[in-house]
Image (spheres, rainbow, N blue to C red):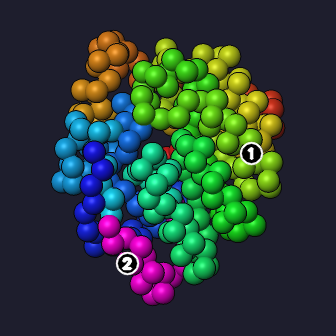
């Protein structure tokens, strides 16, 4: 279900490393990833347990964005931090594309994060600008995507899009997270992701599973109680990942140091 709602602001101050602002054109996300903790911090906006089924377009967000870029100090804008800017709704609505035009014309640097190859549509805007593009590649395995990211594009489409964007000289990065013990932390999985980082000259940002109440409710459909208890035992996996990155000459950092 896609509906529209008015919003009060377009550029929100961000506390994430490297970002001054966040821009989220939608509430909700059609990718419906089971591990996403955004619904738990948006309980006043939409029902958390309907995450992935309801998407709300911020109907006046572009008008507000045009006003805010004229009066706010320039800084890096994260597109997006609480929704995927290239989720299925974006294909027809093009809110993200029009927002990028506004930000570029106003001289704001942009950092895009997505799971979707739809970002390639906007290469004409992105190329040659102060814009980097990050792809969330939580696993190279289709079965992981089917279980944990039911509405998201398959990994091979993300990988292909990453390679395309990188080949055009655009700065790219890979978000490898959350790393879930027993599901996407195998040595050969890490090796494939690190080699992809080396091939595309992409920094790898990794993260652990962020446990929140509704995350637990959604994940319990596919994970047992003992698997939640293993979520903190990632020291060995993180060390292995960092060693692989060093071996292949790939920059690597934890998402929230």
Q: CA distance from mark 1 to mark 2?
A: 32 Å
Q: Which residues are magenta?
A: 59-78
Pointer 2: residues within 10 angstroms few (<14), some, or many (20+)? some
Q: Which mark is residue 64?
A: 2
Q: To which quarter of the image does residue 249 belong? A: top right
In this view, 193 is above or below 113? above
Question: Looking at the image, which residue is at 35% across and 15% down?
Answer: 223
Please rate how many residues cluster around mark 1, counting C-alpha atoms within 10 Å: few if below 14, some from 14 to 19, many from 20.
some
Q: Secondary structure under badge 1?
A: helix
In x, y percent, where is residue 212?
28, 36
Q: On screen, 226 above or below 201?
A: above
As helix, strand or loop, the secondary structure at mark 2 comes to helix
Q: Position of residue 76 (x, y in %)?
A: 56, 68
- Give the residue pinned by disc 1: 164
Say which quadrant the N terminus sits in.
top left
Q: Earlier in the sequence, mark 1 or mark 2?
A: 2
Residue reaching furthest to the front: 92
- Which residue is located at x 44 percent, y 59 percent? 93
Which residue is located at x 58 percent, y 34 percent? 137
**Is 223 rendered above or below residue 27?**
above
The residue that appears at 62% across and 37% down in the rendered structure is 158
Say whether residue 192 is left or right of residue 60. right
Q: Is residue 161 left or right of residue 50?
A: right
């Amino acid at each position: 279900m896609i509906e529209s709602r008015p919003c009060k602001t377009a550029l929100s101050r961000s506390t994430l490393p490297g970002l001054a602002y966040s821009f989220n054109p939608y509430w909700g996300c059609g990718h419906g990833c089971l591990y996403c903790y955004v619904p738990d911090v948006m309980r006043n906006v939409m029902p958390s347990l309907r995450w992935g089924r309801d998407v709300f377009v911020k109907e006046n967000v572009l008008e507000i964005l045009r006003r805010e870029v004229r009066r706010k100090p320039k800084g890096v804008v994260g597109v997006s931090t609480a929704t995927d800017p290239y989720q299925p709704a974006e294909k027809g609505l093009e809110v993200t594309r029009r927002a990028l035009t506004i930000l570029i014309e106003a001289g704001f640097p942009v950092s895009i994060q997505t799971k979707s190859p739809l970002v390639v549509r906007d290469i004409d805007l992105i190329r040659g600008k102060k814009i980097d593009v990050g792809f969330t590649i939580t696993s190279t395995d289709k079965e992981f995507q089917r279980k944990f990211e039911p509405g998201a594009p398959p990994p091979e489409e993300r990988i292909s899009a990453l390679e395309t964007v990188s080949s055009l000289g655009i700065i790219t990065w890979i978000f490898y997270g959350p790393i879930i013990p027993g599901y996407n932390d195998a040595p050969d999985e890490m090796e494939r992701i690190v080699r992809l980082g080396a091939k595309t000259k992409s920094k790898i940002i990794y993260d652990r599973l962020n446990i929140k109440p509704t995350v637990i409710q959604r994940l319990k459909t596919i994970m047992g109680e003992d698997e939640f208890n293993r979520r903190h035992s990632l020291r060995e996996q993180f060390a292995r990942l960092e060693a692989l990155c060093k071996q292949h000459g790939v920059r690597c950092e934890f998402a929230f140091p």
